[in-house]
Image (cartoon, grey):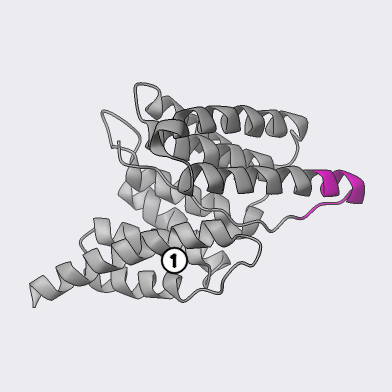
C-alpha cells in the first residue's frame, strides 16, 4: 500500500468556551505530535510513535463524541500510521479512517476548513481498489474538489489534488496545483508540518515537471 498521508489544518469552532478551549488544546497536542512522528522521528522509531499517538487520538475522540474535529484527527493519525508502518493491519486502519471521516462530515461538512474531504479524497486514491481495497479515483476527485472549494488556497488541498493529478498522468494540472501548494501562506504555529510538506511538494513538482518535459 502506498504511503498514506494526510493533512493538518486546525480551524476549530464550538459553542461552550470552556469545553472548546480544552478540545483545542488537546487537538493542538495531537497535531504537533503527528508532525513530530511523521517528519522528525527516525524510521525505526515511527511504529512506536504512531502506536502511542493512535491511542491518544482515540481517547480524545471518545472524550468528545459529538465533535467532528477529534474524529478527523484520529482518521489522520490512523491513515498516516497505515502508510508508514504498512503490514496486515494497514487496510483495516484505512477503513476505520474512512468511517471516521464520513461520520465527521455528517456532523460538520466544513470541519477543519475542508480537511475531512482532503483526507477522504487522499484515501480513495492511495488505497488499492477492488478486490483488495476500497480505492476509487472518481470518489477521490469528488472529495478533493470539495476540499478545494472550501479552502482554495490551502497548502494541503492543493498538494493532494496535485499529487492525484500526477497519479492520473495529468502532469500539466499536477504542476499547476503543486505550484499553488508551494506558494501557500505559511502557518506560523505549524513550522514542522510546513517544512515536511514543502519537501514533499518539491519532490512531486520535480517528478511532474520531468514527466511533462519528457512529453515535449
Residue under the point 56% across and 44% down: 34
Residue 21 lies within the magenta run: yes
Q: Which residue is mark 1?
A: 158
User: In the image, 148: left or right of 52?
Assistant: left
> What's drawn in magenta, residue-wise?
13-22
**Secondary structure of residue under mark 1:** helix
Residue under the point 49% across and 66% down: 155
Residue 108 lies within the magenta run: no
Residue density around tag 1, few if under 14, some if 14–19, many if 20 or more, within 10 Å: many
Question: Front-most of 143 and 184?
Answer: 184
The rendered magenta stretch, by its main secondary structure, is classed as helix
Residue under the point 59% across and 33% down: 53
Q: Position of residue 197 (x, y in %)?
A: 45, 59
Reply above or below: 61 against 162: above
Residue under the point 31% across and 49% down: 137
Q: Quadrant of the C terminus?
A: bottom left
Q: Quadrant of the N terminus?
A: top left
Q: Position of residue 185 (x, y in %)?
A: 56, 74
Amino acid at each position: 500500500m502506498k504511503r498514506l498521508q494526510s493533512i493538518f489544518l486546525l480551524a476549530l469552532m464550538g459553542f461552550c468556551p470552556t469545553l472548546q478551549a480544552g478540545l483545542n488544546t488537546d487537538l493542538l497536542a495531537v497535531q504537533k505530535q503527528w508532525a513530530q512522528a511523521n517528519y522528525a522521528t527516525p524510521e525505526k522509531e515511527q511504529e512506536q510513535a504512531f502506536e502511542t499517538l493512535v491511542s491518544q487520538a482515540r481517547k480524545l475522540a471518545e472524550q468528545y463524541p459529538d465533535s467532528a474535529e477529534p474524529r478527523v484527527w484520529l482518521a489522520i493519525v490512523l491513515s498516516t500510521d497505515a502508510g508508514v508502518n504498512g503490514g496486515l493491519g494497514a487496510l483495516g486502519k484505512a477503513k476505520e479512517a474512512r468511517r471516521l471521516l464520513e461520520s465527521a462530515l455528517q456532523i460538520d461538512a466544513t470541519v477543519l476548513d475542508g480537511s475531512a474531504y482532503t483526507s477522504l479524497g487522499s484515501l480513495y486514491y492511495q488505497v488499492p481498489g477492488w478486490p483488495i481495497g476500497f480505492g476509487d479515483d472518481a470518489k477521490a476527485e469528488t472529495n478533493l474538489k470539495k476540499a478545494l472549494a472550501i479552502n482554495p488556497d490551502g497548502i494541503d488541498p492543493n498538494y493532494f489534488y496535485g499529487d492525484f493529478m500526477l497519479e492520473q498522468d495529468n502532469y500539466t494540472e499536477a504542476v499547476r496545483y503543486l505550484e499553488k501548494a508551494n506558494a501557500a501562506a505559511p502557518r506560523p504555529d505549524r513550522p514542522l508540518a510546513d517544512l515536511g510538506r514543502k519537501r514533499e511538494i518539491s519532490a512531486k513538482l520535480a517528478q511532474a515537471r520531468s514527466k511533462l518535459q519528457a512529453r515535449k
